[in-house]
Amino acid sequence: MRLGLDIGGTKIAATVISAEQDILWQFTTPTPKQQLNDFLLCIQQLVQHATTEVGTLSHIGIGIPGVVNDQGVLNASNMGAINQQPIGTLFKKYIAQPFSIENDANCFALAQAHGHQLAENEVMFVAVLGTGVGGAWVLPNRTLWAGAHHLAGEWGHTPLPDLSLIPKSQHITCQCGQQGCIDSYLSGTGFSQLYYQESGVKLDAPAIISRYRNQENTACDVFNRYVQYLAHALATIIQTFDPNCIVLGGGMSTIQELYQTVPQYWSKYTLKPPTTDLRPPIYGEWAGAIGAALLG
């Protein structure tokens, strides 16, 4: 039996799967992200809880925001207590079982590859459109690919292809310090910012989509801009790597209209109309934990 931990800024989702990939146990707990010792004790307690509930664990997979570099140090994480910490070394003091650590978007992608039954010779790109924007690649044989320097999934911190068409006054500065990142426009946060720029009203993405469905002019204009930005950004992925399918994740992936409208636009930016499938995510909020359990 394998335990997967999906560590997020708000909660940690834990799930145990069998050798046949049946879900045996699931549990969530708030993430202690201020104090390192509290965080590590929480992980230890989750492992103990899972063992009590289901028995011996053969492997533990841990999905975590950020990138673990070649020295085992966690970088670019929004988890203040553990960022820039030698996370693998620390976990060894609290976890007795064999374990693997992977970026959370990669864990999500691994779950999608299994859930969508990706064939052995197929390639999948996952675009996570949440509070921020991330990405992940699954290569043939359902192999995760992080790149030579663990940057292959950091699609959100490349420039938006349409940036030259946006007035300078509407450029958004990303949390990474750069201007014009995909993250700043295609995240749920960015979507809300686009609406705020046009209306002066601060709303979250679900509220804006509700107004769009009620045919509010500003919401319709902002949604159409968002679709074109997303289509152009994904077209660069298609044109560069030609994946068999693209799966969306994060809160924006629940907008069903994207799956019809985005493929209609992205052919404008490619040499020929692509046959790439755009697919919704599966497994819901447990996808990251299930993907973590599949590691190793």
Image (tube, rainbow, N blue to C red):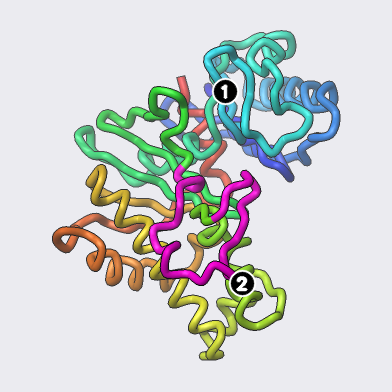
SS for tag 2? Answer: helix
Q: Count every numbered label the image shows and give the total.
A: 2
Residue farthest to the front?
168
Quarter assignment of residue 122: top left
Q: Residue at 27% x, 56% y: name it.
A: 277
As helix, strand or loop, the secondary structure at mark 1 comes to strand
Q: What residue type is labelled 1?
A: Val
Q: Residue furthest left?
A: 272
From the viewer's perspective, is residue 226 above or below residue 6?
Answer: below
Going by the image, does 79 lie left or right of 22? Answer: right
Q: Where is residue 180 in the image (x, y as percent from the top left)?
A: 52, 56
**Where does the image place residue 171, in percent across and percent down from the top left?**
56, 64
Front residue of 232/115: it is: 232
Say which residue label 1 marks.
68
Residue stretch in magenta: 155-179
* Residue 212 lies in the magenta-colored region: no
In which quadrant of the rendered view does residue 20 lie?
top left
Instruction: Determine whether 27 is above or below 189 in the image.
Output: above
Within-10-Å neighbours for mark 2: few <14, some 14–19, many 20+: some
Q: Of helix, strand and loop, which mostly describes the magenta segment?
A: loop
The span from disc 1 to disc 2 (Cα, nearest Å) is 33 Å
Could one spot residue 152 in this view of the protein?
yes
- What residue is at 58 percent from the left and 48 percent from the top? 178
Amino acid bearing label 2:
Pro
Residue 263 falls in image quadrant: bottom left
Q: Residue 158 in magenta? A: yes
Give whichever of discs 1 and 2 has the lower sequence position.
1
Q: Mark 2 points at which residue?
A: 206
Residue displayed at 25% across by 42% down: 241
Residue 247 x/y as whole percent: 38, 51
Depth check, mark 1 against mark 2: the one in front is 1
Residue lying at 51% horizontally and 71% vertically, measured from the top left: 167
